[in-house]
Amino acid sequence: MHNVALPIILLAIIASIFIKAFSKKSDPEKKRREDLAALASKFRLQFNSGNDFDLAEKFSFLSWLRRGDVRYAFNIFHGNVLEYPVTIFDYHFSTPGEKGGYDYYWSAFIVEMKTNFSDMIISHESRESRLAEALGESHITFESAEFSHAFRVRTFDKKFAFDVCHPKMMEYLLANQDLTIEIRGSAVAVLFEDWLRPEKVEANLSRLIEIRKLMPNYLFSKT
């Protein structure tokens, strides 16, 4: 009896080790969180993986970040990059629907500024942009037909639109057509309809900083 029990115990131990190892490997969210934390350390930024409802509320002045219900930020990076104060985070919101509604996960890269700019959104044609235009909110047309075709620039301050979307900025955006940008008050935000991908965070952070750098200095001297 003793000789039979020993192999069974050994098999149980091996199975337990295998299950633990497999469970660890099969938790992609944990791995993503660990990779994001490592990136924060690399950039010398603070990192908090927990749900933060206050941060989501802080940035709810951005129209793209005040949608739906149960809004919260998580996997939050915060600090200075090249002397620019930046905040990066995953963003969750939900909308009502059958079977408990729907959850959406976006991500935001935000640089804060000591200013109060006019509201402007640079995005692609979408159902929302078409609805806005149907309600009378027209987009700005630029001399570059290629840029006007690729992006919808919506703002009530036409001069500000031309100040921001100068030739070098348009050239940069045409080379980065996956970007959606919102400028409002003290923030420039680059937004993605996807959660933070560790392999893309550094490049997207660099693009946020580049967009901020491409904004003319004279805009800040007027504020």
Image (spheres, helix red, strand yellow):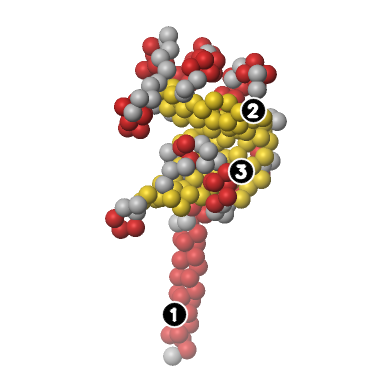
Residue 104 appears in the picture as rendered? yes
Among numbered discs 1 and 2, the one appearing first in the sequence = 1
Q: Which mark is residue 182?
A: none
Secondary-structure class at tag 2: strand
Residue at the extreme top of the image, as rendered: 143
Q: Name the residue under label 1.
A: 8
Q: Which residue is located at x 35 percent, y 52 percent?
A: 96
List x then y, in percent, for residue 114.
67, 30
Determine which quarter of the picture holds residue 79. Answer: top right
Quadrant where the C terminus is found in the figure: top right
Q: Which of disc 3 and disc 1 is earlier in sequence? A: 1
Residue of label 3: 77
For marks 2 and 3 on the same chain, the one whose residue lies earlier in the sequence: 3
Instruction: Please report the residue visible at 43 percent of the width from the left and 85 percent of the height from the top.
Output: 4
Q: Which amino acid does label 2 sit on?
A: Thr
Q: In this view, does 108 lie above or below 47?
A: above
User: Which is more toward the observer, 107 or 161?
Assistant: 161
State how far apart marks 2 and 3 are (Cα).
22 Å
